[in-house]
Amino acid sequence: MTEGPILDRMRLFLVESPIKMARAQGVGSVRGSVKRVLIELSTRCGVTGWGEAAPWEVFTNTPESAFSALDLYLRPVVIGHPARHVRALMAKLDRTVTGCTDAKAGIEMAVLDILGQSQGVSVADLLGGRVRESIPLSFSIADPDFAADLARMHAMVPAGNRLFKVKTGVKPHAEDMAHLEAIRDAFGDTVDLRLDYNQALEPFRAMTVLREVDRFRPTFIEQPVPRRHLDAMAGFAQALDTPILADESCFDATDLLEVVRRQAADAISVKLMKCGGMLKAQAMMAIADTAGLPGYGGTLWEGGIALAAGTQLIAASAGISLGCEFYMPHHVLTEDVLEERIPHENGAVIVPKAPGLGIRVSEHSLKHGAKHLATAG
Ligand SMILES: [Mg+2]
């Protein structure tokens, strides 16, 4: 038996993409553009796969640092490695560089894209097969101009969108209350509202704030306090009927074990850029499933390639049942490097069926869909 396709070439592109709307998140607010690293991996027999490292400096890393780690440290491990031995490759990458989870996730998705194409199956099939064909899509209400977001909701709700996540804690509490009231007044219970504080509250008095927003019947409240305050999170999870979801408190399986041990959350946000890839995300979900915590498909600032990987992961992971926020390419990026965007229908992301990640990137789309800041390889 041969070792199968050998990874032979890695091209890297540090790109900058303009975005249509400002995004206020409390920390690391984004305006104008986002930067990402795109990874093209090729085998000796000419199969090409795509990956993407999409860090956010207040979460994992900077794009420039991910580019350097890929180019100088991870490249020598990847080149010459058999594509089939994905777990062995990922273990070697972990031994080579600590952290850089976004860069490693990008390599893994490119390798799985190659394997899927070589075998004529989708990445979801490689990950155990699909348990769903579509994923409910959540849009984040994060525009500093709330009226602009409300106008978007008036267009999106009739188009079938039901899930909306309001970024709370950025503006004064009274303003958050007024916005939540305006949303419930306009849409009643037809929308599934979620709140995300992005760590904005201090444990002191947070319970009062959360009890007040609780009356708007959110499906979950995400990361109300800073990442380290697991005991405060446990207090909210016990005291409130509304589930508490851990995002910044839960990057990887080690964090998740602690969340479970201290009963610090009722659900988790799973992000490829936090945990370092789809295999690790599935390992996390094995723990979360066992502990009874559902997963939510979160994002940093990924474009179409990384979101295709997230889509394949959720298609194959029953426990990630709270939907996804993969709205960037359709609603925020003015351009993307995919030949065709992954379809959204009736408020859901449709899981591509084509082999690999199910996307197409060409020299033309790569050249015209993003501004290239640096290339290597
Ligand atoms: Mg979050």
Image (cartoon, helix red, strand yellow):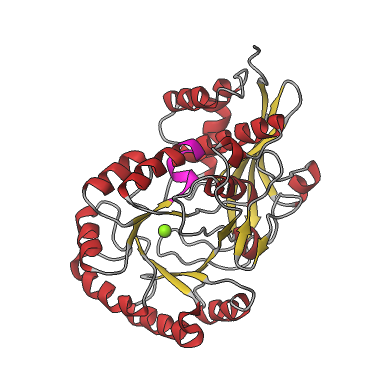
Q: Which residue occupies the foreground of this view, 173 or 295?
A: 295
Is 200 one of the magenta-colored residues? no
Q: Quadrant of the N terminus?
A: top right
Q: Quarter of the image holding residue 78? A: top right
Q: Which residue occupies the foreground of this view, 283 or 179?
A: 283
User: Does residue 212 lie above or below 80 as drawn?
Assistant: below
Q: Residue at x 43, y 81 (%)?
A: 179
Q: x%, y% of residue 105?
A: 52, 38
Q: Which residue lies furthest to the right in this view?
A: 364
Q: x%, y% of residue 276?
A: 47, 38
Q: Can residue 315 be seen in this view?
A: yes
Q: Which residue is drawn at 59% across and 37% down?
A: 109
Image quarter for ligand 1:
bottom left
Q: Quarter of the image holding residue 334? A: bottom right
Q: Is residue 376 visible?
A: no
Q: x%, y% of residue 342?
A: 68, 54
Q: x%, y% of residue 305?
A: 63, 46
Total residue callouts: 0
User: Does residue 275 lie above or below 216 as drawn?
Assistant: above
Q: Quadrant of the C terminus?
A: top right
Residue range (magenta): 270-279
What kind of secondary structure does the magenta stretch mostly adopt? helix
Left or right of 312 on screen, residue 295: left
Is 271 one of the magenta-colored residues? yes
Q: Which residue occupies the foreground of this view, 154 or 188?
A: 188
Q: Residue at x 60, y 59 (%)?
A: 328
Q: Which residue lies furthest to the bottom in this view?
A: 185
Q: Which residue occupies the foreground of this view, 52 or 293?
A: 293
